[in-house]
Image (cartoon, rainbow, N blue to C red):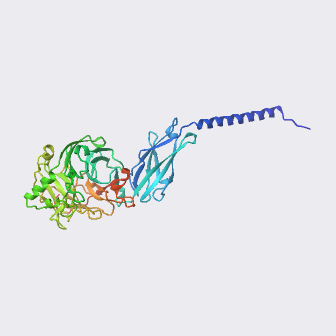
Amino acid sequence: MTVRPSAARRCGAVAAAGAAALLLAGLTVLARADTGYAAPTITLSADHLSGAVEGSGDPTVTADVEQAGVPAGFLRLQVVSSSNPAVAAVDDVRQERTPEGDRRLTVRARAQGYTDLTLRVTGRGGRTATAVLSYAASARTAAAPATRYLTGSSDASAAVDVGGGYALVADDESNVLRLYDRSRSGAPVRTWDLGPALGAKKEADIEAAARVGDTVYWTGSLGNNKDGKYKSERNTVFTTRITGSGATTEVTFTAAYKGLREDLVAWDGANGNRYGFAAGTAAGEVPKQIDGFNVEGLEFAPGSTTTAYLGFRAPLAPAVPGGKALLVPVTNFDKVLSSGAKAVFGSGIELDLGGLAVRDIRKNAADQYLILAGSWAADDNSDPYALYQWDGIPGHAPVKRADLPTGDPGGWEAIVSVPDLRVPGARVQLITDNGAADLYGDGTEAKDLTHPEWKKSRSAWFALGPIRGGHR
């Protein structure tokens, strides 16, 4: 006997088959629609990024992820591989969404070295795109929590506080001034290339700066180059005018003078060649020797807008181990720049800095001075550095306030600003010249790195010790 399905069962089967067919048709249509999505894209704000082991406030890179017709928030960004996980692994990359839907990336370094991090964005329709972020990590420093890195240049040589937590920084390998946020690591907010205004084909070897109102005075080293050759660009002092402050700072070139070296040599000759300036500037003489000729400090005398102190890295006075550091007052420094007048000099000021020379000198509005003291030598990264307080008055002795660490790459080169030195534990921010440093352990000096994002100077804050005698 044959049993036939009921009409209800036949109708149910037909309905189920119809539903399945409709579902399959719908999925087919959806799949066809998905394949119509354009491929997503990743655009990095920089293809190269640097960081530091146990670094704080490390630089970031922004990834702009897009897919036509799809909100950025629906796209998934992943780090899918690292070429050197010992330096930074996939899980060491942090993402933060910006209000615009972009992704801000920060990398936590595990060790010194390089790695390529591959990023992948996945969009609608399963479409993907990749990009590579090349990352370099420098070693941990002794003052890691208080350290920040100024990228784009490795040869910071002078700094000026422009208010609002920002500083204008020069380097001695270019004629570019860079504006940095003092509290963060990363690239400059603004840059100004003064080479064309200076008429300079090579670097002016900017080594020091001093600010009076909205005018900043800058000086080159005035000495020969490292091969003992005279380069006219280095024999330059110039001024810029600052408008605005903080992140809105603007810089305008105003004037230059290119005869200060000759004025100094003539003055010293007229005074019995006491400091040996003629010999120190002679052809073949390198600047960074104990009897060389090299300016690295500039600041105005107490209460003055006309007399400026030139601080010498070399020579010492006398030019023997244990000699004193030398300052030479230029009593008409304002006129030298404003009208091209020949420089007029006061008597040399000789300061006992424990056998060290002037690497920077800076004062605050209360005429409290800090002198950054270091070696006259070229290979000075491991030589002693110290901070001395002074009152700016010739004949008064400076007082040591701190010895600076020297175990990390880079030489201490610039004082950003001077706090109230009467406050116990006052803190000062210093910047290094890292040009000769091997930052990433591959034997390459920072100044020779091929990517500006990997070039960097180091800044750190230091607390000053108590005053022990001497003039305040």
Q: Position of residue 301 (x, y in %)?
A: 15, 52
For the residue pair 465 and 209, the one nearer the viewer reads as 209
For the residue pair 424 and 26, the one nearer the viewer reads as 26
Q: Position of residue 356 (x, y in %)?
A: 21, 63
Quadrant of the rendered image containing residue 282 = bottom left
**In the current view of this chain or complex, which residue is farthest to the bottom?**
321
466 on left or right of 88: left
Q: Position of residue 149 (x, y in %)?
A: 35, 53
190 on left or right of 389: right
375 on left or right of 271: right
**In the current view of this chain or complex, which residue is farthest to the right?**
1
1 on left or right of 411: right
Quarter of the picture containing the C terminus is bottom left
What residue sits 25% from the left and 43% below the top? 196
Is 413 placed above or below 306 here?
below
Quarter of the picture containing the N terminus is top right
Q: Position of residue 293 (x, y in %)?
A: 18, 59
